[in-house]
Amino acid sequence: MRPAGDTIFAVSSGRGRAGVAVVRISGPAAGAVLDQMAPPRPKPRFAAFRTVRHPATGEMLDEALALWFPAPKSETGEDMAELQVHGGHAVVQGVLAALGSIAGCRLAEPGEFARRALENGKLDLTGAEGLADLIEAETAAQRRQALRQAGGSLFRLYEGWRQRLIGAMAQLEAGIDFSDEPDVAADTLKTARAEVAALTGDIARHLDDGHRGELLREGFHVVLAGPPNAGKSSLLNALARREVAIVSDEAGTTRDVIEVRLELEGLPVIISDTAGLHAAATGKVEQEGMRRTVARARAADLVLWLIDVSAPPAAVPVGIAAKADRTLVIANKMDLLASGVLHPLPAGAIGISVLTGDGMDHLARRLTACVRARIGESEAPVLTQARHRQQLERCMAPLTSFLGSPIGEVELRAEDLRRAAHALGRLTGAVDVEDVLDQVFSRFCIGK
């Protein structure tokens, strides 16, 4: 990341031709940019119609709306300006080139506006991550979760926990200061221990959430598995309502994993079509496809084991059967019922016909119910990223040490709480997080 003293600019609206393009400018020269390119400078937080000109040549570039946001009441906490110009390529490139010609101005890097907001106290690290998730949200449920996080739900929870730890640390310090008064010291240590015990329980319950927030953020993974020619690719196309996979009567058509993203009642679902599983595979390519199928099924949140009712029932392989509580057996080709060639259905199997569509509504309802049971939606703040879980686990280790060690070793117990508070501070950016900033903000697009 380059020095923060520069004034940065970028297009913050979408790429490509559009009716309007928003060019954002942030930094010490933002006001001077407006004075040079779109004078006179508008009143703060009011839009004004202006002619935009090149600062060196005076050439007219566009007629646009100009806005002025003086620090600290701006999104980044710095002086900020916006030019809302026409969205044609030539106009946008002309304005960007003119901005680049002004001393001290440069094109922003990905996430640099949000990073400056973090550095100026306008945003915390979990809020920044929520903002990135909001930009990438594909479903209504993802949008709602990202909005809650960007709005500070996780920050308030984690910062509240950190303040409780700091309070417990103060109680320990008081116990040390009043060590010559046994009653006072005992009371303060008892109070600190009770607070830490309660906080440890709160964090443990937050961690024991079945990864709901992470599943919602990343998508619920469903794997279609079964013997060759059971209709897995046809089912994938039916669920996606478009031709995603090649369908053929020839066994072994699917060799590699094919994925499609769906939205079920606002919930994100990733469905993977996989190679058919059978014992007669001889070719290396087919064997590799089957190995990948089993690996995907083991890692899946739900397996749809698809069988052909006109063939003898195929047993679920041992590697997949271990996930019995996350496996639905689907019996396809129920349209052959009239021919009398059906084999008995396994207990609990869902009968469908991809060809006629019979049973597909029931399957969709069952699938949605499984996804909702695992993900659900809660107004309460939930863990959304592996980084959050890692830091909370790092916080839990010293808290467990505090509660399980002799309270008489006050200095060591105070160090336990300091380590725990430091881990919570790294969640929100309240303490040193330089090693994670580049990773977090690299996810952002330029202009955000």
Image (cartoon, rainbow, N blue to C red):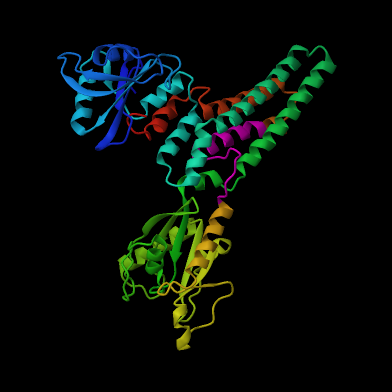
Residue 413 in sight from this viewpoint: yes
* Magenta segment includes 398: yes
Left or right: where 250 falls relative to 206? left
**Percent position of residue 154, x then y:** 56, 33
- Residues shaded magenta: 375-400
Rendering quarter of residue 20: top left
Residue 319 in sight from this viewpoint: no
Nearest to the observer: residue 107 or residue 199: 107
* Magenta segment includes 103: no
What quarter of the picture does the C terminus occupy?
top left
Nearest to the observer: residue 356 or residue 326: 356
**Percent position of residue 92, x then y:** 23, 28
Give above or below for 317 relative to 187.
below
> Residue at position x 37%, y 67% from top?
233
> Residue at position x 72%, y 33% from top?
198
**Percent position of residue 238, x then y:** 40, 65
**Percent position of residue 422, x then y:** 57, 25
Nearest to the observer: residue 134 or residue 230: 134
Left or right: where 119 falls relative to 245? right
Rendering quarter of residue 202: top right
> Residue at position x 29%, y 31% from top?
21
**What residue occupies the far bottom of the structure in this picture?**
340
**What residue occupies the far front of the structure in this picture?**
49
